[in-house]
Amino acid sequence: MTPAAISTRALTKYYGAVIGVEDLSLEVQQGEVFGFLGANGAGKTTTIRMLLDLVRPTSGTASVAGHDCQRNGLEARAQIGYLPGEMPVYPELTGAGYLSFLASIGSRPASRARIEFLLRRFDVSDLDLRRRMRDYSHGMKRKLGLIQALMTEAPVLILDEPTSGLDPLMIEAFGETIDELRRTGTTTVFMSSHILSEIDRVCERIGLVRHGHLVAVRTLAELRTESARRITVTFAAPVCTDVPAIPGVVVIARDPQRWVLDIAGPLGELLSSLNGLPVSDITMTAFTLDETILRMLGAESR
Amino acid sequence: MIALIRRSLGRTARPLIAVALVLCGFQLALIAAASSIAADGNVGGLARLVPGFLQPSLGLALLSFAGMTTIGFFDAIIVMLVVLFAIHLAAEPAGDIEAGLVDLLLARPLPRAWLVTRSVFVMMSSTVALVLVMTAALWVGLSWLAPTQASWPEPRVVVKMGAHLMLVAWCFGAWSLAASAWVRRRGTAVGIVAIVGVALYLIDFVGMLWRPLARVAKLSPFYYFHGGEIISGTANTAQDLAVLGSIAAAGFAIAYWRFSQRDL
């Protein structure tokens, strides 16, 4: 059986009295595009840095492609292409020199064709490559960061806030690249973000992390199914009946002419309860993924 | 490893060249000054002006043309310049952490110890290069500027001077590396070790003046590098170098251990 591309078991990191990550257990399967969501300081980067063995866990274990990140760190990291959240550079190097240096210290070769493809994809010209990195904009540094993470075609990509600082065209180029990787089925992408639209665009499954705790892991399809919808029931004649108590239904507003309800889960029971009432209209508005996730984080935190 | 070292040497090249030029310039100026004094027949006169407590070091050097031309290896400013340069180079791991470069490097399958080994190599080789350049400048300067009758310093003395200077620099480089394995900022590591270095220099200096401090002065690496003793042949070079080498080795060992344990 193929081991999970990324696996953590009760992973915990304390910084003195401060919780970095606590009891985080997670599995990401090979070929999956997994989004790791949370606010700033939620523990996303700490988790990533433990996967890279840059930070040592207080307890628990983490592995990449079946290799323990601490005990067999070299084997684990040989499987990884990584984009840091803050892109570090050697200011005195040119872009070409930077990519060449990073290619020379990895164990996986970066083919010329792959690098040229990525340079075209992220619109990095020869002129850009000849400039020293001290003259690069934030966005240009991020593009070089993405290229260095993708150039070795590592089986596991760990991307820390990959589209931060990119313009919309480059965000689209990034999305296309992830789509292509997904189609190959061999590359696993683990990306952290707090930009929900980006996660919605590229990820199949997400983990929500808050204050160092993994509060939920769902596929986007599950999230949409479970997500609350706002239903407005309008009556042709005044109705004095109470709103039936149905699990998952929250009454937002109620008067004899109109009920406004939020419902999570199947609609069947609610529709049955309306049978016999003078319903003139039913409108339904689905919450966006953003709203659903924010509500979920809020509910879990409560 | 070679790529790491090349990258690190690439960043070091400019400051290394600048320091080497300063040291070469000083060597040449010193030989020119010594030649002028020798031509005037004042060699030895300067030694009488040196206070008593400095006679064992500087006084002995000023007694001869050959001694004067070796001052470039043990003058306080020169020694501190070489030591501070070694401290700066060896603090590179903290600089990598501070700049976030460690994330980029160690996200690849590189052992952590390689970053320490790279900095050890760069610090040691740069120090060796400086000492070789100083020695070359000394011989070039002597060939070019020395009066024909003047006797040159014995190669044995120059080699010992260079070895002592190198080992003292390695001691502080090693402790800078150890400090950089603890802290997250290069400036912090450099600052701490530089201040300690100056303090230890002063302890050694005051130890020559004031007998009660003489015992404490043995804790200072500078205690094991007195140029006058090397010139006069009273230095126990093998023992001095062994002590300095041991201090450096301890610093390196601590750096390797701490860097392997820490969160980066």
Image: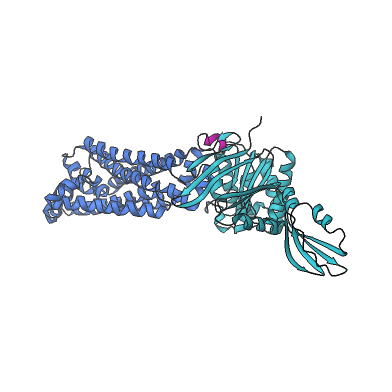
For chain B, the rendered hue is blue
Closer to the camera in the image, B72 or B169? B169
**Is residue B63 in view?**
no
Residue A70 sits inside the magenta stretch: yes
Q: What span is in magenta?
A: A68-76
Image location of residue A241, percent across then percent down: 80, 64
Image location of residue A272, percent across then percent down: 84, 55
Question: Which residue ends up furthest to the front in the rendered image?
Answer: A241
Kindly indicate which chain is depicted in cyan in the rendered structure. A
Identify the coloring: by chain
Closer to the camera in the image, A257 or B112? A257
Residue B67 sits inside the magenta stretch: no
Closer to the camera in the image, B10 or A49? A49
Q: Residue at x 85, y 67 (%)?
A: A235
Please determine whether, in this image, residue B48 is positioned above or below residue A23.
Answer: below
Image location of residue B112, percent across then percent down: 47, 40
